[in-house]
Image (cartoon, rainbow, N blue to C red):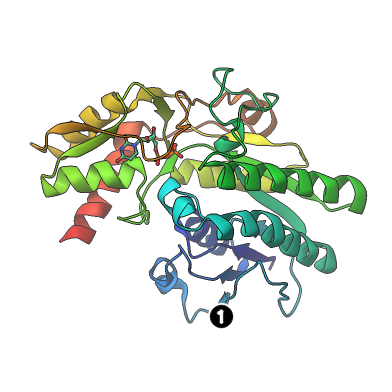
Amino acid sequence: MPRAVVTGGAGFIGSHLADRLISEGWQVVVVDNLITGRLENLQHLMGRDDFRFIQHDVCEPFDVEGPVDYVFHLASTASPVDFVRHPLETLRVGSYGTENALELALRKGAKFLFSSTSEVYGDPLVHPQPETYWGNVNPIGVRGVYDEAKRYAESLVMAYHRYKGADTRIVRIFNTYGERMRLDDGRVVPNFVCQALRGEPITVYGDGRQTRSFGYVADLIEGIWRLAHSDYHEPVNIGNPEERTILEFAQLIKQLTGSDSPIVFREFLTPDDPKQRCPDITRARQILGWEPSTPLEEGLQRTIAYFRGRLE
Ligand code: UDP
């Protein structure tokens, strides 16, 4: 039975990855300091012989008893609200946290997968974004703590791969939504869905002409699973290339929830909010044979049902 460590496993994506690993017959050890993750996401796994939870901040060196075959390093804040609230923690988890996770993998002879982000492309001048694009990031902007932490972490992972022989992979995750997102994480999907379900105004930041491409979490996990089993060491974009403006997205949420909420316009939460974002997934198609299979409306219906349950 292979054994994996999932840092950030109490978070939205980490907990779905833990589920997938367990369903594939793996043993899973989650390491999470619960700064943005929630034990509730793992409640159904607690008490199982093949599952263990360790509450620990990966910015401090750590060890895990017994053999480890794979380290999945997902620990990080991920929403703009969270990284504005926890800027230093965000920088530290990308730097010290990533180094500690890499050191664990080296000590254990384990493979390593790092969850990076489309934010490494910043406010992109190339559209859609292929992995070969180096990005347009403002290092001193409010979002810089996240973007640069992830960019540094990618450098660190590649250096461990090149100079220390670590067996690494990097996934660049584009906007992802689904069950277990926090209602208050401030991202556009929980905000719009909760506002629509409560009959509150739907808050579009700026003029709503900025674009995003939304991928359903189950598709992302399938991409991560395939990448984990590949021998490809450079970054791979995983996301859904179906692109919409945020205003169109607000209208879609309104329609799918049957809400009467008005759509209102507000100031941007952060300057440097990327004006466009859409993954070029040619590499994922070619190397992993992966592409998203969940239509946006179907994934959103499931997500809306989840939020409805939580708001009752
Ligand atoms: N956004 C919005 N209203 C909200 C929350 C977000 O218009 O209540 C916009 C935000 O300005 C951005 C997009 O939706 O252009 C996606 O934001 P999110 O925080 O989900 O993630 P990002 O892609 O910016 O990391």
Image quarter in which the C terminus is found? bottom left
Mark 1, Cα crowd under 10 Å, few <14 / some 14-19 / many 20+, is few
- Residue 39, quarter of the rendered image: bottom left
Q: Position of residue 207 (x, y in %)?
A: 29, 23
Image quarter in which the N terminus is found? bottom right
Q: Relative to 136, say whether 79 is above or below.
A: below
Q: Position of residue 17 (x, y in %)?
A: 53, 56
SS for dot 1 = loop
Decide which of 15, 275 is in the foreground and name it: 275
Dividing the image into four equal quarters, which quarter contains ligand 1?
top left
- Residue 75 visible? The answer is no
Q: Relative to 253, say whether 146 is above or below.
A: below
- Residue 296 visible? The answer is yes
Q: Residue at x 30, y 40 (%)?
A: 300
- Residue 183, quarter of the rendered image: bottom left
Q: Residue at x 67, y 50 (%)?
A: 114
Q: Position of residue 270 (x, y in %)?
A: 42, 39
Please name the amino acid that badge 1 sits on: Asp
Decide which of 126, 17 is in the foreground and name it: 126
Q: Position of residue 3 (x, y in %)?
A: 68, 68
Q: Relative to 99, say whether 229 is above or below.
A: above
Q: Which residue is mark 1?
A: 49
Q: Residue furthest left?
A: 260
